[in-house]
Image (cartoon, rainbow, N blue to C red):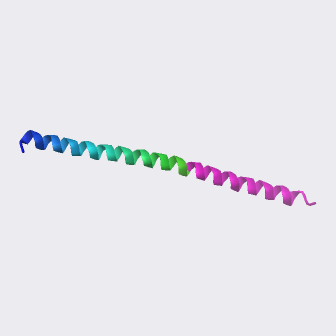
Amino acid sequence: MTVMERDDLTDTRNSVEEQRRQEAALRAKKLRGRNLAVLAALLALVVLFYAITVVRMGGGH
């Protein structure tokens, strides 16, 4: 194996590792977006339940 072939092999490994890092970063970004959407939905439900409770307690004079 020549020095040039070893350099090509090293470059290929680095390229594959970089691609994996980029894919992992993209997955993490998508997961974070999904988590924020779930958080927003849960907070909306909490606010809705609180509002319903206040209206029901206040309307029973």
Q: Of 40 and 60, which appears nearest the observer?
A: 40
- In the rendered image, residue 27 lying in the magenta stretch gets the answer no
Q: Where, quadrant-wise, is the C terminus in this rendering?
A: bottom right
Left or right of 32 on screen, residue 5: left
What residue lies at 69% left-to-right and 56% top-to-bottom? 46
Residue 59 image-quadrant placement: bottom right
Left or right of 14 on screen, residue 36: right
Q: Position of residue 25 (x, y in %)?
A: 39, 46
Left or right of 39 on screen, residue 26: left
Residue furthest to the left in view is: 2
Q: Is residue 44 above or below residue 11?
A: below
Q: Position of residue 8 (x, y in %)?
A: 16, 40
Magenta segment main secondary structure: helix
Residue furthest to the front in view is: 1
What residue lies at 36% left-to-right and 43% top-to-bottom? 22
What residue lies at 48% left-to-right and 46% top-to-bottom? 30
Residue 15 image-quadrant placement: top left
Q: Of 2 and 15, which appears nearest the observer?
A: 2
Q: Where, quadrant-wise, is the N terminus in this rendering?
A: top left
Residue segment shown in magenta: 36-61
Q: Of 45 and 15, which appears nearest the observer?
A: 15
- In the rendered image, residue 37 lying in the magenta stretch gets the answer yes
Q: Position of residue 24 (x, y in %)?
A: 38, 48
Q: Of 60 and 19, which appears nearest the observer?
A: 19
Left or right of 42 on screen, residue 35: left
